[in-house]
Amino acid sequence: MLFLGYAIYGGKHSADVHPTAITDIKQTVLENVIADGLYLTKETGEKVGQTIPTVAEWNFDTILNAPFEGSLLGGNVSFTADQILCMRLKRAEADSYQWLTLCEIPIRTNEDLDFTRIDRTARGSQEFKYALVPVWNDNIEGNYNINTIRSSFDGLWIVEKDMAAHALLNLEMNTSRNIVTSSVVPLGRKYACVHQYGKANYTSGSLSAVFVRLDEETCEPDIRGGARYREQLEDFLTNGAPKIIKHQDGRIWLASITDAISKNEGSRFELPVQTVHFMEIGRFDSSSDLYDADLIEVNLEREVEDYGLLSFSV
């Protein structure tokens, strides 16, 4: 069909695929072409054939903008470095929106945007959402860039913010949930009356395992260096600092070590079983408790609490 000189497929973009928002794209490959640039956006209303925006026109819908001007840079580093105060790393359970802020990374230069952080406080056998959030110079959070990760590991870990010990061999655990009660049998009554006092409700227990360093390449136990490693482990366990103790099945506690570290050599002196006693001292998912234990770097929860205590008079 012809109408004013145009066929139904006369336009050069008339047979192009209609722009569609797709959220599950994992990677993009560009090969065997000569390209002036690569632009990816979540905005599907843009016209086909539209000029690619400059890096300075980056917005919240922009996924990638690589102008290929002497490099493969595809981000907006030069645009944002002088406009964001910091980057916040947050974590929440997959089915929750109760975000826990793990750290804030101050941004002063472009190089500050290249960083790595390790989260040692997540429980095992569970799926989490991690969000990377820019905080603009006016202290307002930007869009949440979210990825979902499943926490999975073998055995048991005892961790601080920058240190960790792993137990896998001969692992045993015994725990008790503790409350404070008293009982009395009144005269003329068949059964006792039990009263629970206060809010005390915490876990204490012990764990026993063979602690040994595994070779990073072969994953074989380092038997020869085991004695020195266990000395370092005992220094770590008895330094007085709170720990996160977490098991592969999802059990987790914010705890302190409460007693001597015993060692039972048995028939294998090079692989002794060490026993650790611990007591729960706070919530493993509380920003305030983790901050007080020096396991995370920032406590926005307390900032909100402190702000709520402020009073004003006119």
Image (cartoon, grey):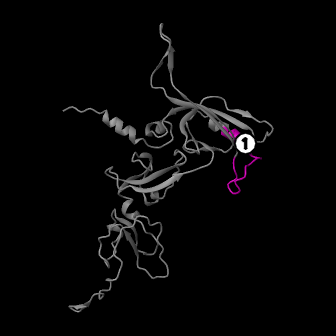
220 in the magenta segment: yes
Residue 43 lies in quadrant: bottom left
Please state which of residues 181 and 261 is positioned toward the viewer in this rendering. Answer: 181
173 in the magenta segment: no
Residue 22 lies in quadrant: bottom left
Residue 14 lies in quadrant: bottom left
Task: Look at the image and give the residue range highlighted in magenta.
Answer: 213-233
Q: Quadrant of the C terminus?
A: top left
Q: Position of residue 253 (x, y in %)?
A: 54, 37
157 to the left or right of 54: right
Total marks drawn? 1
Which residue occupies the extreme left position in the image? 314
Q: Quadrant of the N terminus?
A: bottom left
In the depicted structure, whether residue 80 falls above or below residue 301: below
Q: Residues within 10 Å of mark 1 (few under 14, many from 20)?
A: few
In the depicted structure, whether residue 226 falls above or below residue 238: below
Q: Residue at x 37, y 58 (%)?
A: 82
Please state which of residues 82 and 202 is positioned toward the viewer in this rendering. Answer: 202
* Residue type at tag 1: Arg
249 to the left or right of 220: left
274 to the left or right of 256: right
Please state which of residues 24 and 41 is positioned toward the viewer in this rendering. Answer: 24
Please state which of residues 243 and 167 is positioned toward the viewer in this rendering. Answer: 167
Q: Position of residue 24 (x, y in %)?
A: 43, 64
Q: Position of residue 285 (x, y in %)?
A: 47, 40
The residue to which callout 1 is attached is 228
49 to the left or right of 197: left
Q: Position of residue 79 (x, y in %)?
A: 36, 63
Report if residue 239 is visible in the image: yes
